[in-house]
Amino acid sequence: MARNNHLGRRFWAIVIAIGVAVVCVSGLISFGSMFRQAAECSDNVVAFAKSQSLIYDSFNDSAAMTSQVLALENAAQLARNISYGSEGDELSGLERAARQLGLSNAFVLSADGQLVRSYSNNNVTFDMVQHEVTDEVALEVIDDPRKMYATRIVFDDGSYIDVGCAARIDEPGMVVAGYYTSETFSNRYLLSLQNMLAGYDVRGSGDIVVESDGKVVAANMLPNQVSGGIQLDPVDAKVVEDIKSRCSLGKTTLLLSGSNLYIASLDKARDYYVYTFMPVSSCLGEVAGFVAVALALYCVVVAVFALSRRKSEHEHLHELVVQEREYAERLAKSAHQAQSANRAKTEFLQRMSHDIRTPINGIRGMVEVANAYDDDLAKQRDCRQKIWTASGILSDLVNEVLDMSKLESGEVKLDLRPVNLVELINEVCKMMERQAQQLGVTISCDMSGVAHPSIVASPLHLKRLIMNIASNAVKYNKPGGSVRVTCTEHAHEGEVATYDIVIADTGIGMSSEFQARMFEPFAREQQKGAEHATGTGLGTAIAKQLAELMGGSVAYESSLGVGTTCTITLPLAIDLDAPAGSGEHLALDTVALEGLSVLLVEDNDLNREIAGFVLSDAGAKVTCVDDGAEAVSAFEQADAGTYDLILMDIMMPNMDGYEATRAIRSLAREDAGTIPIVAMSANAFTDDKVRCRKAGMDEHLSKPIDSQKLIQALSKILSAKGR
């Protein structure tokens, strides 16, 4: 019940949280829609204001041009009238001629620009226009009668006069004809811009202000005015000033002015600036309505969901009970598995402690025995053989534990290369012969069923796979028993063939109970007749994972007291480039090292002494250095061809084997790129071998080094290099 209450509180907390999110999102959507509408309205207003102002400006320019052209024509006519008119009073003649032409002002000037006589039916005097009609450009009319001059003169009160100038005909001088427009009529243009905004209601379109030359010429928030300038109230004036200083031209944005937030825009049409602004508060009602509708719909959805949830609550509770029961069962199973794993690891540590201490005790004991028989060569030889056997057991234990660790972590990588399957299996059989002889077991091999012995595989892992199974067949056999290894190629498709490697023994066999868990790590069956067998219980587990890594499988058939048959099935690529006769063994012996000069790079004194002895005993001349830096220096200082081979350790101080190899290969001398460099390292995994090849090494030999294998490997490498 408490759990249900907790779930109910969580449900309503989520509902409320989602409701708040719905309110926020719907509010933002509504405000965004309102903002876009305001922006569109502002764009429409600005576009209309632009088009109208341009029309008004064009109309005004056209009217001004027409008025000035008329003034020019009447100035020329006035010059003719006063030259060929009556002989009456000159002033009255000028007035009569001006009135006939409908002029508001007329002035007659002498050749030096001095007023001779004038006529005016308004307040405009010659002094008010003298500066414009007597400048150098205007007076050029006197010197060249073909020229004419016209302009508009605007006065401080907003009134203006359009004047035209023409040369006198009767004598040197100039006649000026003018049309005066009062302030009242000039304001009609501005009033037309104000009337233009009459159709834009403040409630729907917001506030609109049109400004020219720093003066407000139109605003829709004020009634149409008959005369005089437009004055905005302080709040609107402040908003306009904020728009000027903080808004970008042609963009709609949010503007905080005073304590109010506005949607504002600024644009320009020729000499006119158009400002639009709308208080955000005026739109909140629309936003609130949209939010209310969204919230109502959400409440309906929640109500429907709550009703549905209430109906299925019983089924949900039942499902929770079932899930809790299953979870408890999984926990119990996991706990059991963890306990089993812990027991297996405890047993493994106990066996490892026994299996490691046993050969160590044998090694140390045989050393003491050998020390006690200094003069007995036969006893010395026997002690050394037993020490060698015990050290081999230790090496196998370490290899199996490391292999299993690599396999479980997924770090094992196959090192694919051409290899002869028949030779590899025969080599495994020969390696097992010594152990088999000691136990009185006979090993036989039959490779007659292999049609394509040359394959592409990972030799190290393939050998380890076969070795693990064959070793168990020997260890768990009976005195006088036998182990038979056969290989058959029974399927061939394209470049891939399927091989069955069968290892059958006449040993003690396995119980059906143990066969069910034989592939588990650390599994080992203790039964009568296997007291002499030692191991970690990892051999079959490693073999199975290696076979699966190669795309194959391992299958066992066993009966207690009768024996065991293991079948390894592997799909392997055929090496189509292998030369004929590649299956024949090469005769390699110590003769290949006779007289050769070897640079031995090893930082461990004991390992250096052992490797030096093996090489010297094979007839090689050995030069020893302690680390990679000394190796590079020794090779660089020696003449080309001094050394025939470099045996390189990997883990060394100052400079490791990888760096030393790269440094030697990069030297600018003929033998730097061709001299064989062989790694001799305790790093025995495939990725270590790959790193060696990338660094420029020719081969990798794993420690501990078997003297015979070392000589054979070096001989093979030198033969391949043509040395």
Image (tube, grey):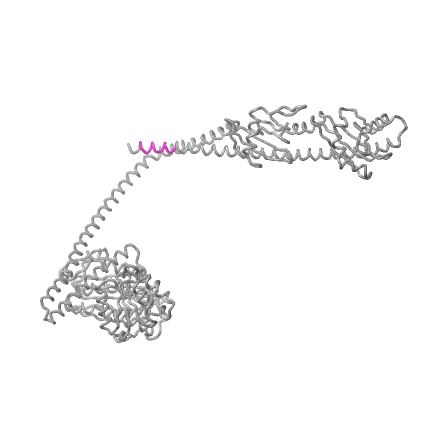
Comparing 49 with 368, the one in front is 368
* Relative height, residue 36 to residue 526 (above, below): above
Looking at the picture, how far across and down is residue 574, in whole percent?
35, 68
Looking at the picture, how far across and down is residue 705, in whole percent?
23, 66
| Residue lying furthest right | 87
Residue 382 quadrant: bottom left
Comparing 625 with 453, the one in front is 625
In which quadrant of the rendered image does the N terminus lie?
top left
| Residue lying furthest front | 112
Residue 244 quadrant: top right
Lateral position of residue 494 relative to residue 443, left or right: right
Looking at the picture, how far across and down is residue 514, in whole percent?
19, 57
Looking at the picture, how far across and down is residue 323, in whole percent?
29, 41
Residue 61 quadrant: top right
Comparing 384 with 467, the one in front is 384
Lateral position of residue 81 relative to residue 454, left or right: right
- Residue 35 sits inside the magenta stretch: no
Q: How many marks?
A: 0
Span of residues in magenta: 5-15
